[in-house]
Image (spheres, grey):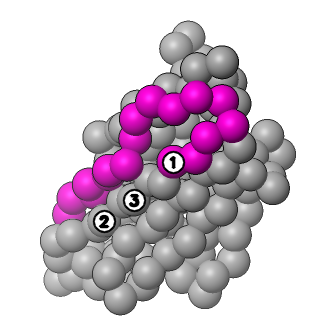
Amino acid sequence: VQLVESGGGSVQAGGSLRLSCAASGSIFSINFMGWYRQAPGEKRELVAITTSGGSTNYADSVKGRFTISRDNAKNTVYLQMNSLKPEDTAVYYCNADLIVSGIFKKYVYWGQGTQVTVSS
């Protein structure tokens, strides 16, 4: 199983970026998919998460600015980030809580991370 992220980059404050993360491999089902971020010297923190049923949860710091969505048919999760602030600068990691085909056990996978830099 592999998670591949795309869409990071550099933007000025107030701008927008859209992150994508596609899960591939021997996947039976995916429960949670989400995004975490880690700034230099800081702990990794939850940004947003969504379930297979479409429920979502956001960190207070991004509510009203970020939107998480998911395409279950493509095993892909997106993060639309609007009104970006310099404090959103971090490496963003995709996360998936899934069941592997054939083994039918639950595993948690992480993407490689994508850099988001917001300048003032």
| Mark in front: 2 vs 3 | 3
Query: Is the residue marked by circle 3 packed among few (<14), some (14-19), or many (20+) residues within 10 Å?
Result: many
Identify the residue shown where x is 61% and y is 86%. Answer: 53
Query: Is the residue marked by circle 2 packed among few (<14), some (14-19), or many (20+) residues within 10 Å?
Result: some
In this figure, which residue is indicated by the disc labeled 2? Answer: 22
Comparing 11 with 94, the one in front is: 11
Q: From the viewer's perspective, tell me whether residue 43 is left or right of residue 55.
A: left
Report the Cα–Cα distance between label 3 and label 1: 10 Å
The quadrant the N terminus occupies is bottom left
In this figure, which residue is indicated by the disc labeled 3? Answer: 20
Tell me if residue 8 comes above or below residue 55 in the rendering: above
On the image, the x and y values in percent for residue 11 come to 51, 32
In this figure, which residue is indicated by the disc labeled 1? Answer: 17
Residue 16 sits inside the magenta stretch: yes
Query: Sequence-wise, which precedes: disc 1 or disc 2?
Result: 1
Residue 79 sits inside the magenta stretch: no
Query: Is the residue marked by circle 1 packed among few (<14), some (14-19), or many (20+) residues within 10 Å?
Result: some
Contact between labelled residues 2 and 1, with CB atoms less than 8 Å apart: no
Contact between labelled residues 1 and 3, with CB atoms less than 8 Å apart: no
